[in-house]
Image (cartoon, rainbow, N blue to C red):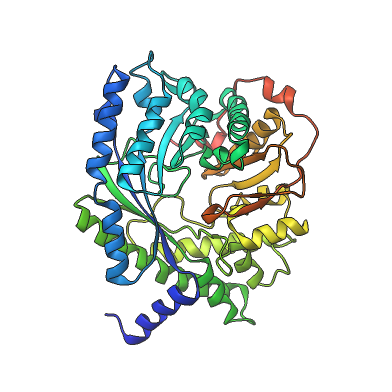
Amino acid sequence: MLNTFDILETIRMIQDECLDIRTITMGISLLDCIDPDIDKACQKVYDKITTKAENLVKTGEQIEKEYGIPIVNKRISVTPIAMLAAACPEGETVKFARTLQKAADTCGVNFLGGYSALVHKGFSAGDLALIRSIPQALAETTNVCSSVNVGSTRSGINMDAVALMGKIVLESAELTKDKQCIAPAKLVVFCNAVEDNPFMAGAFHGMGEPDCEIHVGVSGPGVVRSAITKYPDASIDQLADVIKKTAFKITRMGQLVGSRASKMLGVPFGIVDLSLAPTPAIGDSVAQVLEGMGLEQCGTHGTTAALALLNDAVKKGGVMASSNVGGLSGAFIPVSEDQGMIDAARAGTLCLEKLEAMTAVCSVGLDMIVVPGDITAETISAIIADEAAIGMVNNKTTAVRLIPAIGMKEGDTLEFGGLLGSGPVMPINRKSPAKFIARGGRIPAPMHSIKN
């Protein structure tokens, strides 16, 4: 039973500490929309999405008013479109992207994810056509997001896909160089992608999911930072307890919203994703949580250990608050979306190599990182391969979302605005990995993948 203190505490978290529900995301299966005629398939896709998600935005807004909880984004994820493209090899695959944009506009959602392909063990029918269409698809659309899974712990890493994705990322940036190179900001390259992720740009509706369901992504780095600052002399294990208790409170709010949205929409409740997702807003920063633990600036020595503590405590606190925990669940470190990360990168304290080390202990990976516009496709592929290797060996989800800033150099700033923020162009290693990437083939799965 809620008491007055609990209610007042929640109000304070929302008003002063940037607590919000980052997203409610409706997952929709499009398997029953498959048709050899691409135009008929697109019509089926549009009809199903607009029918299932007709009341999604209205429901989110109603819950906001009912509970006074900000819900920042209302989103949709769909079956990986490569599976639909496989049935119509003669069609222009980018038509699916245009249809998804039309559906997003009709439903009024912020983003629609699932222009995706799963190629961790090789390319099947439809995969190559979709991947090659990604630059055009993301350049032509505003709200459509794309992802490609190139590796997994059980299968290894598809290096042919890794090589191809380096070219796709660079081409996407070139096609939108007059729009702040926005296309690659909507493209994620995964290892060990999950099927119930509510966060963009990597969300898609997996094969093991029901026909339609609702997911919730919570966020509260500002709340965690505020809680930590109240215990300036606490030991490390005491800090872990503080974070766990705070994560519990944040997740309970997500559970409440998810349950209510599920009932109102008449679809199953999927998962609560516990991830601490920052924004450019002052105080809503994962980097500042780490600095609150005692680091002078994020990126200095000790950052990886502090992040490991934070990530573990968030998970432990969250799983006690909901029986439906899933998605990615941890701490995100997107550079352009986190003011503390931006400041650390500009100061030179946070570099690409340190970010890579941090991704071994937190959610996802190298996220929203702006790199020089003259970066080669092979270097992008090598960065993807490094991050995929961390995910494969550690049996965790990792990802890369790099934005080549065409026409910009180290020290310049790329401005996106909104939740995507702005990012300083970070330096890269200029030695070439081209011969390694050109070898192709597949990096075999690690020994510990053999579990049966």
Residue at point 65% right, 31% down? 381
Which residue appears farthest toward the top when viewing the image?
90
Q: Give the residue at the far front of this rendering.
A: 178
Q: Is residue 446 left or right of residue 3?
A: right
* Visible residue check, residue 212: yes
Picture quarter containing residue 371?
top right
Q: Nearer the viewer, residue 25 or 315?
A: 25
Q: Position of residue 37 (x, y in %)?
A: 29, 17
Q: Give coordinates of residue 135: x percent, y percent.
A: 53, 29
Circle count = 0
Left or right placement of residue 414 versus residue 113 in this view: right
Asked if 366 appears above or below 165 in the picture, the reply is below
x, y percent for residue 57: 30, 54
Position of 327 with respect to 370 (left or right) is left
Instruction: Out of 340 and 141, give the one closest to the viewer.
Output: 141
Q: From where the camera sits, is residue 121 visible? A: no
Q: Residue at x 33, y 18 (%)?
A: 87
Residue located at (56% from left, 72% from top): 225
- Determine which quarter of the picture holds residue 392: top right
Give the vertical position of 284 relative to 371 (above or below).
Answer: below
90 and 234: which is toward the camera: 90
Which quadrant, please, contains the N terminus? bottom left
Residue 126 percent across, percent down from the top left: 41, 20
| Quarter placement of the C terminus | top left
Q: Is residue 60 above or below residue 103?
A: below
| Closer to the camera in the image, 373 or 401 | 373
Q: Residue at x 44, y 33 (%)?
A: 116
